[in-house]
Image (cartoon, rainbow, N blue to C red):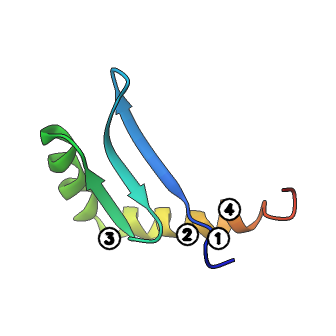
Amino acid sequence: LKDIEFIRSNYYNKLEYARFDSNLGRFVGYTEFGVKQANYWNSDPSYIAVLRAQREAYCLHNIDIW
């Protein structure tokens, strides 16, 4: 169960500009705009805590289905 991860990707015009990875526990930006957004999102500890909890709430909850 340790290899399960929650990933939330953000796209604009079919281009991924930022991604949250539960293994890293933070957002990573892939474009200039994405880096700015990632820094903004990473500066909000409550938002990061919600996304970290999504691994347990969404991924681990549905593991028995697959």
Q: Is the Cβ of the residue at disc 2 closer than 8 Å to that at disc 1?
A: yes
Determine crowd level at label 1: few under 14, some 14-19, many 20+ residues with C-alpha closer than 10 A. some
Reading the image, the residue beneath label 4 is 59
Residue at image location 67% in from the left, 59% down from the top = 58
Instruction: State the SS at label 3.
Output: helix
Q: Earlier in the sequence, mark 3 or mark 2?
A: 3
* Residue 34, numbered label: none
Q: How far apart are marks 3 and 2 (CA)?
A: 12 Å
- Asked if disc 1 and disc 3 are in contact, CB closer than 8 Å, the reply is no
Q: Work out which quarter of the rendered image holds the N terminus and state it.
A: bottom right
Among the two numbered marks 3 and 4 on one chain, the one whose residue lies closer to the N terminus: 3
Residue that mark 1 sits on: 56
Disc 1 + disc 4, Cβ < 8 Å: yes
Marked residue nearer the N-terminal end (1 or 3): 3
Relative to 7, does residue 50 appear above or below in the rendering?
below
- Closest to the observer, 51 or 27: 27
Query: In the rendered image, which residue does mark 2 sit on?
Result: 53
Q: Quick one: SS at disc 1?
A: helix
Residue 34 locus on image (x, y percent): 22, 43
| In this view, 35 is above or below 49 | above
Picture coordinates of residue 43 (x, y %)? 22, 65
Residue of label 3: 45
Left or right: residue 52 compared with residue 64: left
Q: Position of residue 40 (x, y in %)?
A: 20, 55
Residue at (38, 39) in percent of width and height: 10
